[in-house]
Amino acid sequence: MELIKKNNIQITGKHDKPILTDLVYSENNKPKPIVIFCHGYKGFKDWGAWDLMAEEFAEKGNFFLKFNFSHNGTTPENLTEFLDIEAFGDNNYIKELDDLQSVIDWLFLSNNKYHKDLNTSDITVIGHSRGGGISIIKAAEEKRITRLVTFSSVSDFASRFPSGDVLKKWEKKGVNYIVNTRTKQQLPHHFQFYTNFKENKERLTISRAAKALKIPHLVVHGSKDTSVPLSDSGKLFDWSPDSELLLVEGADHVYAVSHPWESNELPSDFRYVLDATLKFIAKRV
């Protein structure tokens, strides 16, 4: 079966920067279940083995869509480097929720040229890490999402902000820097990231959203994740009314994938995750 791949389609969002989107599907003019993938913090759609993941889902009959959050710091000219550091500094959770909403709305446009291949009554959202938190909140809000999968997801945004003197210093300076461990680059967070969270704290409370879910939720986590504790997914499993927990014994935050990923084969940990996710998606709601 030949797969159709459309890369770097620009979806217009609310925040003056394009949402770059990749599509992978088989062109048979039959409506296919839709899978939307949301990357995590310091992530991007072209990271690691995400392309291989897209092909796996498409080969199993899904219409797979992955995208860059508009303010993730990459650009259409540089898809894997954080060269737009002002955009990175201006990013926040509300912008990411808006971007995901824009992607979903795009699927429903009457002039969407892919409409023959889209089963818009069957939409799964997958979120990795911070993208998991975004996906949970959106899935509680957006009734057109029919299934949710979270990979190594955070369970709380508030606790990830600094406090005390560090917070006061951030407010005074207006910017705080974090190191991208992969590139050693200093990346900014403008103080608006914190104030925007405070202004929208109830909406951005993941526990509230998880408890409000009315759809099946597959919670996936590696037992040796050093970026997001396994206990975060334990909480999500408890909160979500219709949840399944997949514990990947010995797996790290990205299931043994790294960037760049040069192999055509997936690591066994990630293969295990994808196989389980595909089975979960194949259960019709």
Image (cartoon, rainbow, N blue to C red):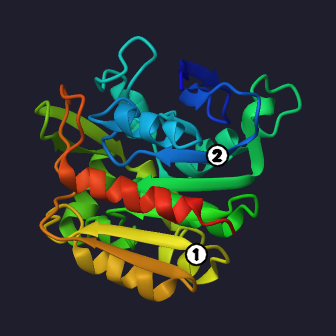
Q: Position of residue 49 (x, y in %)?
A: 29, 36
The C terminus: image quadrant: bottom right
Q: Of residues 63 and 203, which is closer to you in this image?
A: 63
Relative placement, left or right, of 72 versus 162 is right
Residue shown at the point (19%, 33%) measured from the top left: 259
Residue shown at the point (33%, 82%) measured from the top left: 234
Q: Of residues 88 and 198, which is closer to you in this image?
A: 88
The N terminus: image quadrant: top right
Task: Kindly identify which residue carries mark 1.
Answer: 209
Q: Is residue 244 above or below residue 199?
A: below
Whether residue 42 is visible here, answered yes or no, is yes
Residue type, mark 2 in image: Ile
Q: Is residue 247 above or below residue 102?
A: below
Q: Quadrant of residue 102?
A: top right
Residue shown at the point (59%, 73%) measured from the top left: 216
Q: Quadrant of residue 107?
A: top right
Task: Kindly identify which residue carries mark 2.
Answer: 34
Q: Of residues 164 and 252, which is closer to you in this image?
A: 252
Residue type, mark 1 in image: Ala
Mark 1: secondary structure: helix
Q: Is residue 25 above or below residue 98?
A: above
Report how far apart the C-alphas of labels 2 and 1 lie in the structure.
22 Å
Asked whether disc 2 touches disc 1, contact meaning CB atoms under 8 Å apart, the reply is: no
Residue shown at the point (44%, 59%) measured from the top left: 277
Q: Position of residue 196 (x, y in %)?
A: 51, 56
Q: Position of residue 194 (x, y in %)?
A: 41, 58
Whether residue 129 is visible here, answered yes or no, is no
Viewer-side label of 2, 1: 2
Q: Residues within 10 Å of mark 1 (few under 14, many from 20)?
A: many
